[in-house]
Image (spheres, rainbow, N blue to C red):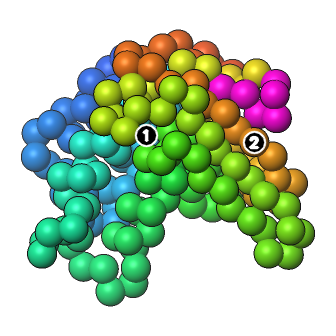
Amino acid sequence: MAALVTRLGGPQTFTSRLSYLHDSGLLYVGDEQAFLTVFQFHYSGRPGLSTQRAHYYIPSQFNTSVSGIPGNDDGGAMGAFAVLSMMGLFPVHGQDVYLISPPFFEEISLQNKQTGKVATIRNVNFDPTYTSIYIQSAKRDGQAWTKNWISHDFFLDGGVLELELGPTESDWGTRDEDLPPSMSTY
């Protein structure tokens, strides 16, 4: 991903081109290949834009109406995208990486049935009107967490990830060292 961001002109141009993909109507979120594009802003240091896109697609494309699941959900991909997006942890396929966005709920907890450990994600300043959807700061087990991603050990070991929310994008998760891992360098 770092090489792709660089090849497309750097973080600012990558973000602009990715935004165009979403804004132009070229992208159809009812096709599984579109899922990661919602969260690729994490790789250019703009995790807030990923959150903004998730809050656009849910509920505009994923809702309780008759046509509330776009595309074909025969394999469960559409439902899985909605659930994972609403949980605030989007998995990067083939990697031990989950991109962090605030859950659509005040708090979620997942229990590992093998270890009994519980992983909890808590939104501080949760706003049920979804005006304050941007992460201002984060703590993992009481310690500052600046990475815009988390690994699978969170589910194995359990713990608490607290996300302080606000109404505007912040600089949380934007530094090069906070971006998701890549085979190439940023």
Q: Does residue 48 appear in this view?
A: no
Rendering coords of residue 11 (x, y %): 43, 21
Q: According to the image, label 2 marks what residue? A: 160
Residue positioned 48% across, 33% down in the render: 126
Foreground tag (1 vs 2): 2
Sort mark 1 into few (<14), some (14-19) or many (20+) by Cα contacts within 10 Å. many
Residue 90 in magenta stretch? no
Residue positioned 25% across, 61% down in the render: 62
Circle 1 SS class: helix
Residue in front for this viewpoint, 182 or 76: 76
Q: Are marks 1 and 2 in contact (CB under 8 Å)?
A: no
**Magenta span: chief secondary structure:** strand
Residue in front for this viewpoint, 28 or 169: 169
Residue positioned 64% across, 45% down in the render: 121
**Label ID, residue 40:** 1
Left or right of residue 59: residue 37: right
Q: Mark 1 or mark 2, which has the lower sequence index? A: 1
Rendering coords of residue 160 (x, y %): 75, 42
The stretch of residues the image draws in magenta is 138-143
Residue in front for this viewpoint, 140 or 22: 140
Sort mark 2 into few (<14), some (14-19) or many (20+) by Cα contacts within 10 Å. some
Rendering coords of residue 52 (x, y %): 33, 34
Q: Is residue 122 above or below residue 9?
A: below
Residue positioned 63% across, 61% down in the render: 94
Residue type indicated by callout 2: Val
**Image quarter for residue 78?**
bottom left
